[in-house]
């Protein structure tokens, strides 16, 4: 590892991947049940259909195609919102019903803004010891970034589409922030939101005419109190997905999706620390951060950060680099198409899973991996960056098996699922059925766990292994 030879054993240890090899569990194989056969048939049909649409050459095509996906045109149309006017000037077409071009264009700009906010806050967390981390009721750390992103995205979407017309389902609630002993935190959030909104023109959006006050910020956060459901249009936001990764200076994501009549129709995933050199996904981002400080800042090997997006039924998913300081964002910002990996041999495939054992059973997935012949170490990555890794072709499988009783939330999956599907992959529950985003904030009816794969062959193998081993597992 010449890159890491700092002649200090300490550093070599630090640079070890934060993954363990747990390929030791052996499983008793059982015959598939009738339900298994039925679900395999279902998933196989579904997968083949997906596969047919995904087996095409995408390569590195640039801007014009990405622009077409988002409906970019030079046409203008009348609109009362100044933010929309600005978007139109940028070339984002006002969408007709079912087109979603305007929504996609604005969502991508807003996520770019949110990523820039998060980067600033995370830099300050990584470089100093922080007093910006709070405890939520469930003891997970919550940061200024969570609330600030939620306020910013909510304010921007309300400006663009009208606060009365908009339904937003988002992770954070306003309670702990509005308590009297949170004044310092609220001040920090208001400051962070205003700093971010002041930069809106750089992202082709309009900033408020004057800085927002605390009441307006709290209002913007609490406006995200929708519970979604089977009818109508709902935006779904995870302001900082992978809070643990964020506070540890590692991977996290800003995830924004749009659900219409229970179906995810748009997904935007900002991954500010996603390394363009995929090998770095194996390492704790803190070391990447440290190395990038040591080596020249212009070095291409440290290039990181992207926003991925997709629109339902387009059969295409796209990735833009993050907007750099002093650069103006111009849609579609050198977007390039992304596609899932074509590897279907388990021995060559990489599987991802949550870092925390508490969030997914590492021993069960190690057993599955062993039984289908996966040989590589699991890639443990925080947040929906795991979905991004599959969509970009950097890994082939993502598995999550939460403990019994835990209900998965729609904001932890919506954006990632549609991006993988449009990039040519398959996402289902462990019974082979599509995830149901129509039932409110939870993925109700989820069968055991979530399986996302680059293609049908690996997907069928994993689903088969789940059926074969579930009854003997202690899940
Ligand atoms: N007990 C339990 N079981 C399963 N899942 C849980 C659990 N608790 C939380 N969560 C949700 O998992 C989100 C983090 O998932 P990750 O895949 O990033 O997990 S990990 O941090 O890498 O371990 C995390 O999202 P964030 O809160 O945005 O970080 C939670 O929504
Ligand atoms: Mg989350």
Image (tube, grey):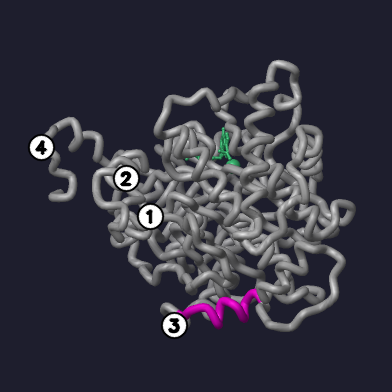
Instruction: Please indicate whether residue 203 sits to the left or right of residue 24 in the image.
Output: right
Q: Quickly name the residue at label 2.
A: 288
Cα distance between the residues tagged 4 and 2: 18 Å
- Kind of element beneath mark 4: loop
Magenta segment's dominant SS is: helix
- CB atoms of marks 2 and 1 within 8 Å: yes
Cα distance between the residues tagged 4 and 3: 45 Å
- Identity of the residue drawn at 75% across and 38% down: 217
Q: Give coordinates of residue 167: x percent, y percent.
A: 81, 51
Query: Which image quadrant shows ligand 2?
Result: top right
Query: Which residue is more in the foreground, 462 or 85?
Result: 85
Query: Which residue is more in the foreground, 333 or 364?
Result: 333
Instruction: Please indicate whether residue 235 sits to the left or right of residue 317 in the image.
Output: right
- Identity of the residue drawn at 60% across and 33% down: 144
Q: Residue furthest toward the top?
A: 181
- Kind of element beneath mark 3: loop
Highlighted magenta segment, given as a residue range: 61-70
- CB atoms of marks 4 and 3 within 8 Å: no
**Which label lies toward us, 1 or 3?**
1
Instruction: Please indicate whether residue 87 sits to the left or right of residue 159 in the image.
Output: left
Disc tally is 4
**Which label lies toward us, 3 or 2?**
2
- CB atoms of marks 4 and 1 within 8 Å: no
Q: Quickly name the residue at label 3.
A: 57
Q: Give coordinates of residue 28: x percent, y percent.
A: 39, 44
């Amino acid at each position: 590892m010449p890159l890491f030879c700092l002649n200090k054993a300490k550093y070599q240890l630090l640079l070890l991947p934060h993954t363990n090899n747990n390929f030791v569990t052996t499983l008793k194989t059982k015959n598939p049940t009738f339900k298994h056969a039925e679900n395999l048939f279902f998933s196989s049909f579904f997968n083949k259909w997906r596969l047919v649409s995904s087996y095409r050459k995408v390569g590195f095509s640039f801007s014009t195609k990405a622009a077409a996906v988002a409906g970019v045109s030079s046409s203008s149309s009348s609109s009362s919102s100044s933010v929309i006017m600005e978007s139109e000037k940028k070339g984002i077409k006002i969408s007709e019903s079912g087109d979603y071009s305007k929504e996609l264009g604005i969502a991508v700009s807003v996520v770019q803004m949110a990523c820039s906010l998060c980067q600033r806050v995370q830099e300050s967390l990584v470089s100093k010891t922080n007093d910006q981390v709070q405890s939520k009721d469930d003891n997970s750390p919550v940061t200024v970034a969570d609330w600030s992103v939620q306020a910013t995205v909510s304010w921007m979407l309300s400006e663009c589409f009208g606060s009365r017309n908009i339904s937003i389902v988002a992770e954070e609630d306003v309670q702990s922030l509005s308590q009297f002993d949170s004044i310092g935190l609220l001040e920090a959030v208001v400051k962070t939101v205003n700093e971010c909104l002041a930069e809106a023109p750089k992202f082709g959006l309009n900033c408020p005419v004057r800085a927002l006050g605390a009441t307006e910020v709290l209002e913007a956060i609490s406006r995200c109190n929708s519970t979604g459901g089977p009818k109508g249009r709902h935006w779904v936001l995870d302001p900082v997905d992978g809070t643990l990764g964020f506070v540890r200076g590692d991977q996290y994501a800003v995830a924004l999706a749009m659900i219409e009549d229970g179906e995810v129709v748009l997904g935007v995933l900002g991954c500010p620390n996603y390394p363009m050199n995929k090998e770095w996904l194996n390492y704790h981002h803190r070391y990447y951060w440290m190395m990038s400080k040591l080596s020249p800042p212009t070095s291409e090997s440290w290039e990181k950060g992207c926003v991925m997006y997709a629109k339902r039924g387009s059969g295409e998913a796209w990735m833009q680099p993050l907007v750099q300081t002093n650069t103006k964002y111009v849609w579609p910002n050198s977007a390039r198409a992304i596609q899932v990996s074509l590897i279907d041999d388990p021995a060559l495939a990489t599987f991802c899973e949550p870092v925390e054992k508490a969030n997914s059973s590492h021993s069960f997935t190690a057993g599955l991996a062993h039984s289908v012949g996966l040989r590589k170490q699991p890639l443990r990555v925080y947040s929906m960056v795991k979905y991004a890794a599959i969509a970009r072709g950097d890994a082939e499988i993502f598995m999550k098996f939460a403990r019994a009783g835990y209900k998965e939330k729609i904001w932890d999956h919506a954006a990632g699922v549609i991006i993988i599907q449009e990039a040519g992959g398959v996402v289902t529950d462990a019974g082979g059925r599509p995830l149901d985003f129509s039932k409110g904030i939870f993925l109700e009816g989820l069968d055991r766990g979530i399986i996302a794969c680059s293609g049908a062959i690996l997907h069928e193998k994993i689903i088969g292994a789940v059926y074969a081993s579930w009854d003997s597992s202690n899940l």
